[in-house]
């Protein structure tokens, strides 16, 4: 968080923004606050108290530093001015920053002092002001470090990031005071870099050991290659014929090029830039592979050209077109767009469809004059389209931009897929195209109406999104926004209730009352089970894509808060149990050890689904005492086993969603235990389920509806196993959720017999 003024930060970030920053840090992120960014992150900001023109004071939300930051440490500060600046001497805590000189100089302009720093055991003072300051404080702490949750915070009243060589001469040449500051900083700059590097390492960042070299990597040769016979030779000859090339050098409008084919030794250009030189002005060496040879991956380790052209040929059905067939690649370049657009002379003689790509750009261009160094792997790409001049040329250019935008979106949605039109999980990404070619991804709150929202989604919607923001994570702990599990817990309970009511001819009101209480109980107890699971799994969930945004893992709910919320749910669940016959209370209490043990099973056994299935089948037993029926084990046990098998089936399918993450995280499941044998095993279990379900019906003297609906439901389950692709997340989720409908088919048959019994037909 940079310097400047902290009030604008407060205006923008107070509330939601600060909560996100705080959660990010507590979950292992790092916060680095310079000057105003440090005032903003302290418990209180006290800036120029008593100065009517400058005073800013008050509490701050982040409170990463447990006390106030008070300034100015040195009087004379003026906004938008270097009048109060100085090259301030710091005394470094070398017992913590061992590779740094005992004294360093930093640029200072308006920074403060971290009050009472030695009072706090969890605060490390990294550097102190080594001069008399204008703030009363014995510690004179200028730079402090503190761990917050799993994360790290470093706050500084000075500007160790300030580098004199980034200033233009006109910024200080007419300011005698500031020139003196710059001269001191220039003399002591090496020590400043050592100090800055040590501070960044303290934050847990990886830092280049070469502190005095250029931050920019050197530009590497641009290799031009094509599998199309003679095409590169023709381009090379065309350039030599039409351009004024002298000794392989050619000066275009923006860049100087060296054009050579592979028969020449690589032209070695002295490219060792000092800090004052601009590496973007380096001569660009362009190597034309006129023989048609494709460089080996050893030559271009970050881009496999052979694989690229193989894919291009495959996707073109063997008939490679002009777009992408001539490729220019550099490991490091300035900007793929600049090299083409700003050099019209060589551009004129390049073929339409010429594609230029690079692993790293050191002068990527954006709107508003923004320039950046992109990280390795972005693979910035520019494609040359040559459109004949006409009255419609401008509209044709826009159309091409639009088509390219659409193509990129299709590439993203089909990422990783080997079959056109079939995605593997990215096809639901909420991408949007702003005319003509700006690609956006919507924020979560704008795409909560996706038709096929699934368990991988981390958004809340409907009535839940309307709740106070602080409440939402607690309802997410209960999985209220993902009711599939609640239905799968409730449906077996309704089987048990309805079959028990059938056996004793219970009145409809008794049955509906029990179903109503069980519905409330299912929401509460499923929520309690999920809360227990998330408390146990908080250090595993961050390794699985589907679970890393759960409330505890993401830091939105602390463990003590989750335990408190669990207590609330258990108390509410107790209220539901006490509303039922006392037998339900005792029988329900017997299930609690299984609920608590389930999260542990995934650590020690490949069959956690067996424990979960016990929990999800308990309602088959509870349904009998709930309506005043005796617990007939000859009926309840086969029904329990039937549901236990069903739960094993659908939860194994569910586990196949996460198997690649589970392997990495060390989480065990039947999906990993059975692997490719899952389908035949599950089909066998489904046949066994049909047997136990039929046995329960026979022992309860059920009517024809029970068996007809049961046969339909078993058919649905078997068909689900035939169609599901256990290696496709979306297919697994679709199959898993379809079990709600299957459960209701079973219930329909039981309920039909019960209603016919009440009507006197059975």
Image (tube, grey):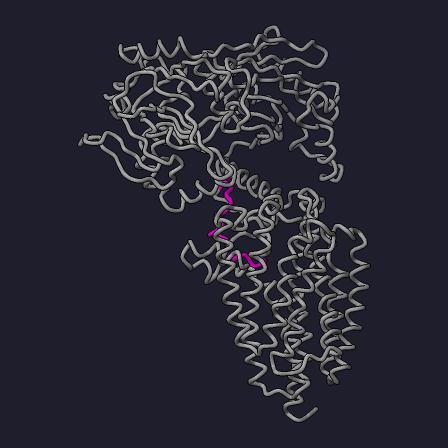
Rendering coords of residue 503 (x, y %): 68, 85
Q: Judge from the rendering whether residue 682 lies leftward or rightward of residue 241; answer left or right.
A: right
Say which quarter of the image contains residue 158: top left
Relative to 750, say whether 178 is above or below: above
User: Which residue corresponds to the image point at 66% horizontal and 76% vertical from the top-left?
Assistant: 496
319 within the magenta span:
no
Question: Residue at left 75%, top 60%?
Answer: 723
Would residue 187 be seen by someone viewing this image from the given angle?
Answer: yes
Q: Looking at the image, how many numbered discs can be counted on the residues?
A: 0
Q: Residue at x 50, y 23 (%)?
A: 363
Q: Nearer the viewer, residue 320 or 53?
A: 53
Residue 383 visible in rendering: no
In magenta, the rendered stretch is 436-453
Is residue 444 on the magenta stretch?
yes
Rendered location of residue 702, percent (x, y):
73, 84
Is residue 3 shown left or right of residue 231? left
Q: Is residue 215 above or below residue 697?
A: above
The main secondary structure of the magenta stretch is loop
In which quadrant is the C terminus drawn? bottom right
| Quadrant housing residue 80 | top left
Is the N terminus in the top left, top right, bottom left or bottom right quadrant?
A: top left
Q: Where residue 165 sits in the image (x, y, percent)?
A: 41, 14
| In the displayed structure image, the side of residue 642 where residue 174 appears, left or right | left
Q: Nearer the viewer, residue 146 or 654?
A: 146
Q: Residue furthest bottom?
A: 760
Q: Position of residue 11 (x, y in %)?
A: 32, 41
Q: Is residue 227 above or below residue 733?
A: above
């Amino acid at each position: 968080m940079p310097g400047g003024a902290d009030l604008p930060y407060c205006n923008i970030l107070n509330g939601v923004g600060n909560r996100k920053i705080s959660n990010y840090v507590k979950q292992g992120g790092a916060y680095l606050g310079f000057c105003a960014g440090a005032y903003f992150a302290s418990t209180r900001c006290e800036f120029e108290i008593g100065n009517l023109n400058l005073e800013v004071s008050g509490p701050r939300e982040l409170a990463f530093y447990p006390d106030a930051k008070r300034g100015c440490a040195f009087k004379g500060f003026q906004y938008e001015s270097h009048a109060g600046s100085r090259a301030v001497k710091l005394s470094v805590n070398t017992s913590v920053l061992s590779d740094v000189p005992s004294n360093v100089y930093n640029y200072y302009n308006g920074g403060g002092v971290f009050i009472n720093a030695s009072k706090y055991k969890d605060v490390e003072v990294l550097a102190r002001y080594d001069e008399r300051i204008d703030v009363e404080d014995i510690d004179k702490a200028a730079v402090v470090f503190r761990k917050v949750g799993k994360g790290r915070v470093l706050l500084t009243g000075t500007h160790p990031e300030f580098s004199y060589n980034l200033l233009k001469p006109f910024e200080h040449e007419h300011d005698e005071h500031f020139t003196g500051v710059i001269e001191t900083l220039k003399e002591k700059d090496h020590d400043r870099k050592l100090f800055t590097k040590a501070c960044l390492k303290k934050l847990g960042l990886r830092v280049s050991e070469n502190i005095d070299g250029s931050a920019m990597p050197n530009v590497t040769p641009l290799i031009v290659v094509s599998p199309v016979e003679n095409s590169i030779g023709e381009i090379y000859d065309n350039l030599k014929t039409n351009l004024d090339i002298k000794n392989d050098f050619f000066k275009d409008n923006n860049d100087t090029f060296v054009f050579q084919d592979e028969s020449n030794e690589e032209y070695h250009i002295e490219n060792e830039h000092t800090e004052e030189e601009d590496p973007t002005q380096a001569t660009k060496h362009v190597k034309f592979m006129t023989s048609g040879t494709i460089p080996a991956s050893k030559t271009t380790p970050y881009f496999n050209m052979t694989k690229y052209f193989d894919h291009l040929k495959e996707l073109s059905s063997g008939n490679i077109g002009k777009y992408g067939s001539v490729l220019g690649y550099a490991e490091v370049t300035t900007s793929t767009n600049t090299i083409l657009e700003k050099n019209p002379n060589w551009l004129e003689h390049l073929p339409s469809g010429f594609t230029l790509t690079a692993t790293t750009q050191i002068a990527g261009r954006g709107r508003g004059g923004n320039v950046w160094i992109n990280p390795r792997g972005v693979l910035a790409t520019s494609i040359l389209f040559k459109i004949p001049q006409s009255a419609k040329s401008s509209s044709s250019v826009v159309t091409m931009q639009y088509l390219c935008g659409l193509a990129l979106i299709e590439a993203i949605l089909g990422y990783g897929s080997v079959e056109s039109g079939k995605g593997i999980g990215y096809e639901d990404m909420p991408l949007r195209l702003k005319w003509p070619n700006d690609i956006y991804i919507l924020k979560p709150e704008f795409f909560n109406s996706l038709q096929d929202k699934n368990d991988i989604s981390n958004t809340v919607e409907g009535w839940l999104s309307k709740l106070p923001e602080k409440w939402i994570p607690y309802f997410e702990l209960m999985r209220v926004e993902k009711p599939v599990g609640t239905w799968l817990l409730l449906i077996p309970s309704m089987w048990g209730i309805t079959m028990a009511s059938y056996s004793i001819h219970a009145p409809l009101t008794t049955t509906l009352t029990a179903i109503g209480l069980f519905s409330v109980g299912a929401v509460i107890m499923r929520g309690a089970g999920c809360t227990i699971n998330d408390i146990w799994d908080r250090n595993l969930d961050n390794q699985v894509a589907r679970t890393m945004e759960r409330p505890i893992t993401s830091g939105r709910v602390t463990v003590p808060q989750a335990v408190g919320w669990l207590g609330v749910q258990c108390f509410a669940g107790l209220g539901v149990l006490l509303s039922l016959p006392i037998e339900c209370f005792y029988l329900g209490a017997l299930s609690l050890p299984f609920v608590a043990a389930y999260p542990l099973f995934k650590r020690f056994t490949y069959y956690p689904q067996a424990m979960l299935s016990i929990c999800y089948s308990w309602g088959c037993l509870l349904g009998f005492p709930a309506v005043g029926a005796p617990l007939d084990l000859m009926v309840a046990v086969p029904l329990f086993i039937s549901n236990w098998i069903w739960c094993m089936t659908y939860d194994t399918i569910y586990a196949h969603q996460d198997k690649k993450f589970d392997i990495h995280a060390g989480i065990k499941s039947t999906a990993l235990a059975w692997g490719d044998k899952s389908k035949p095993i599950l089909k066998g279990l489904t046949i066994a389920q049909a047997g136990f379900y039929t046995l329960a019906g026979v022992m309860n003297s059920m009517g024809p509806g029970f068996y007809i609906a049961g046969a339909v439901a078993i058919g649905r389950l078997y068909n689900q196993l035939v169609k599901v692709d256990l290696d496709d997340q979306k297919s697994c989720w679709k199959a898993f959720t379809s079990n709600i409908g299957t459960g209701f088919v079973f219930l329909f048959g039981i309920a039909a017999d019960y209603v016919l019994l009440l009507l006197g037909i059975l």
